[in-house]
Image: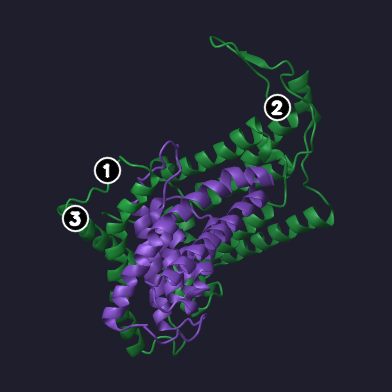
Chain colours: A green, B purple
């Protein structure tokens, strides 16, 4: 089994931004964006997200797997929850509204008459959801492709996480290739004994049970091996002194600007949303007129 | 095996290593079993590896369980290229943390009582973890409670408890043998 990180150096603007500043911006964006359901605000956040995404210089071929997951998520949330069942809009859009297709419509050939009570308000809310979730997705889908996997430990340490937690993250990155190799060896050994992981027959329980001959030996071997690692770390006085990190991070002037922008975005959003009560769900009259006539 | 564990929330060198191993294991096994689809469903992948944070929680405590689930989910998303979804990472962490709360109560991993206790906390852990993750979707996507329960919570909760309930006893019995052989607690 080949396990590889998605990151590669692209000589992009994103490669020059300090990972700590990136996390601060991403979290500030998430919190700010989720304060609004007004499309006039959401379009602002969406544009920021698109600009941020282009900084990564990623290719469609590389990120399509991430976008496939996002598309499935957006489809279930927007098309099924909001447009078809109306459940997705229940928390924000007030009941009632201007119904689109009041007569319903008939599917040709089968002559099924469909009347699912779609309103202009729900349709507009779907657009708002697309802007909000699309923007958030653009910010977070980018991370695996543009953030150096060596930087995570130092980054979380730099963001104020305790050393032990940051080092756990660093250590888990280092264990991935070893465990992937162990998994492949165990899988081959079990296959040699007639184990068929890919067998598609059987119900849910049989499928889960079939995975046990793979999970059990890998887990137990890892636990036994971890004793040696822990002993080696103890012998080197792990946790007794302040840690230093091999991957050094340094703030540049543009990182400071990004952090200031993130702080202003967060404060501005909070003041607008909670101070001035702005950003609640709003629908333009022109949109209703266009649909209802 | 008869000696009681000392502290539930201890996070020393051993716990750092167990957490790191657990997280890496969770990520690798999730990545390795990504091909397993639920019968009759579109894109809902079955994740037998969710048993890893649950088991690590029970074996090594709630902090190890939490970090295994939290970091493991981040790593598996990084490997798969699925981005970073904090609330689902947090949910996976809680799924390891809650079973970890009974770590001190379990002395003999193959005793029926321990297995039943483990199974019960697997259900609580999956409910708590997936509940937090699903409810956060209300905040992010604006969905109402019914939609969140049917589209986010139930599919994740049901598959996770199925995986946990079937695989956890197998891992606990296997660990009991390993622990007995190596003389560890």
Within 10 Å of disc 1 (Cα), the crowding (few <14, some 14-19, many 20+) is few
The answer to which of marks 1 and 2 sits earlier in the sequence is 2
Which element type, helix, strand or loop, lies under badge 1?
loop
**Residue pointed to by mark 3:** A188
Image quarter of residue A152 = bottom left
Q: Are marks 1 and 3 in contact (CB under 8 Å)?
A: no
Q: Which mark is residue A199?
A: 1
Callout 1–callout 2 Cβ contact below 8 Å: no
Q: Which chain letter matches label 2?
A: A
Q: Chain of mark 3?
A: A
| Element under disc 2 | loop
Where is residue B179 shown, x and y percent of the image?
32, 78
Dots 3 and 2: beta carbons under 8 Å? no
**Disc 3 secondary structure class:** helix
Note whether residue A139 is visible: yes
Question: Viewer-nearest of labels 1 and 3?
Answer: 1
Residue B41 spot, x, y in % from top left:
45, 37
Q: Is residue A176 left or right of residue B9?
A: left
Q: Chain of mark 1?
A: A
The residue furthest front is: B112
Q: Give me the C-alpha separation between circle 3 and circle 2.
A: 54 Å
Instruction: Please give the name of the residue rendered at 47% of the width and 87% of the height, measured from the top-left corner.
Output: B6
Which residue is at a point 67% across and 38% down the rendered structure image?
Answer: A87
């Amino acid at each position: 089994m080949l396990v590889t990180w998605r990151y590669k150096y692209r000589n992009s603007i994103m490669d020059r931004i300090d990972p700590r500043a990136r996390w601060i911006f991403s979290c500030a964006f998430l919190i700010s964006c989720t304060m609004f359901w007004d499309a006039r605000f959401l379009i602002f956040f969406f544009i920021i997200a698109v600009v941020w995404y282009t900084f990564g210089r990623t290719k469609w071929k590389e990120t399509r797997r991430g976008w496939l997951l996002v598309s499935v998520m957006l489809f279930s949330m927007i098309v099924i929850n909001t447009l078809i069942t109306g459940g997705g809009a229940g928390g924000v859009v007030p009941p009632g509204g201007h119904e689109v297709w009041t007569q319903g419509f008939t599917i040709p050939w089968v002559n099924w008459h469909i009347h699912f009570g779609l309103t202009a308000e729900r349709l507009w809310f779907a657009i708002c959801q697309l802007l909000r979730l699309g923007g958030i997705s653009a910010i977070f889908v980018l991370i695996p492709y543009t953030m150096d996997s060596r930087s995570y430990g130092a980054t979380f340490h730099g963001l104020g996480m305790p050393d032990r937690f940051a080092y756990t993250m660093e250590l888990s990155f280092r264990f991935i290739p070893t465990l992937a190799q162990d998994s492949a060896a165990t899988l081959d050994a079990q296959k040699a004994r007639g184990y068929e992981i890919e067998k598609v027959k059987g119900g849910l329980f049989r499928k889960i049970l079939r995975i046990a001959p793979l999970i059990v030996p890998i887990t137990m071997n890892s636990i036994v091996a971890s004793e040696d690692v822990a002993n080696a770390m103890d012998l080197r006085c792990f946790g007794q002194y302040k840690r230093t990190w091999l991957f050094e991070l340094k703030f540049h002037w543009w990182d400071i600007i990004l952090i200031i922008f993130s702080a202003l975005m967060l404060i501005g959003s909070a003041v607008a949303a909670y101070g001035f009560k702005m950003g609640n769900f709003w629908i333009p009259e022109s949109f209703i007129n266009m649909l209802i006539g | 095996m008869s000696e009681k564990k000392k502290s539930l929330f201890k996070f020393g060198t051993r716990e750092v290593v167990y957490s790191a191993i657990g997280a890496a294991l969770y990520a690798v096994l999730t990545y390795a079993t990504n091909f397993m689809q639920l019968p009759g469903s579109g894109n809902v992948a079955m994740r037998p590896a969710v048993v890893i944070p649950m088991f690590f929680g029970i074996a090594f405590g709630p902090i190890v369980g939490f970090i295994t689930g939290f970091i493991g989910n981040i790593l598996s998303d990084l490997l798969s290229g699925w981005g970073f979804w904090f609330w689902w990472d947090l949910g996976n962490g809680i799924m390891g943390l809650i079973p970890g709360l009974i770590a001190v109560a379990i002395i003999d991993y193959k005793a029926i009582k321990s297995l039943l206790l483990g199974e019960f906390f697997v259900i609580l852990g999956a409910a708590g973890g997936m509940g937090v993750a699903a409810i956060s979707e209300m905040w992010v996507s604006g969905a109402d409670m019914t939609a969140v329960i049917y589209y986010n919570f139930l599919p994740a909760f049901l598959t996770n408890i199925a995986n946990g309930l079937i695989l956890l006893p197998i891992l606990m019995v296997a660990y009991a043998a390993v622990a007995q052989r190596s003389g560890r607690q």
